[in-house]
Image (cartoon, coloured by chain):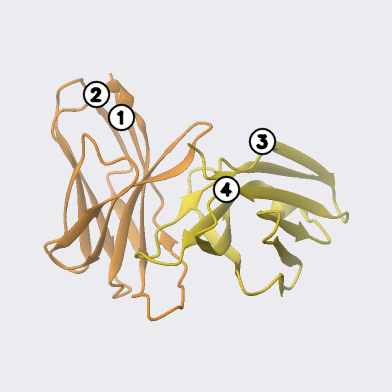
Amino acid sequence: DQQVKQNSPSLSVQEGRISILNCDYTNSMFDYFLWYKKYPAEGPTFLISISSIKDKNEDGRFTVFLNKSAKHLSLHIVPSQPGDSAVYFCAASPKTGANNLFFGTGTRLTVIP
Amino acid sequence: NAGVTQTPKFRVLKTGQSMTLLCAQDMNHEYMYWYRQDPGMGLRLIHYSVGEGTTAKGEVPDGYNVSRLKKQNFLLGLESAAPSQTSVYFCATSIRVRGTSYNEQFFGPGTRLTVL
């Protein structure tokens, strides 16, 4: 049973435009949410996170929005750059435990020059 | 600093063979994790460890064993490999969780395992 879902397997965006990646979750015990970026043949690298007490977190070109009532979060990248082309994973962690993460299935972003 | 390293990078096994994957970290992190990534499934937690000498089961522990004899190493063992264990395996580490804080995990480059 997938507790974190990314319903769009792929997304293509023109360079300079906004990329919006979406993520939904089902477990109300999730307290912290993260986005990871993954290039081929490499491990995932941390991109940005948000606590459940916030609804927005911004870091440079990357902004994550959280809608707790809808159990939905999104990652906005603006402006998109060709180097942003990668697979993006949404992940969530419950309040208790050892930082355990539950991952979505990923969205492959392609930024077209 | 090497960060998180994984050995080997690639391996092909025959059904029934055994092997051990090694994860090593030089970041002095307390927590370590083993994940597997399958097409269309995202990453799923196999086992994890919150400190030397302690391990616990994750989402998909069956068919795997782990050991954490030293803080910097976390070993993942397959006693009798099956084709269903063909996957990419990632190790990750994080610092200790304190109170209500959270700390992100740092991932190794992965081990691609094929079981024939």
Q: Quadrant of residue A7?
A: top right
Contact (Cβ within 8 Å) of mark 2 with mark 4: no
Residue A23 image position (x, y, % from top left): 66, 49
Residue A26 shows which numbered tag?
A: 4
Labels 2, 4: one chain: no
Residue A19 image position (x, y, % from top left): 80, 52
Q: Disc 1 to disc 2, how far (Cα)?
A: 6 Å
Chain ID at mark 2: B
- Label 2, on which residue? B82
Q: Disc 2 to disc 4, how far (Cα)?
A: 32 Å
- Label 1, on which residue? B85
Q: Secondary structure at mark 3?
A: loop
Q: Secondary structure at mark 4?
A: loop
Q: Is residue A66 above or below residue A103?
A: below
Q: Disc 1 to disc 3, how far (Cα)?
A: 23 Å
Report the amino acid beneath label 1: Gln
The hue in which chain B appears in the rendered picture of the protein: orange
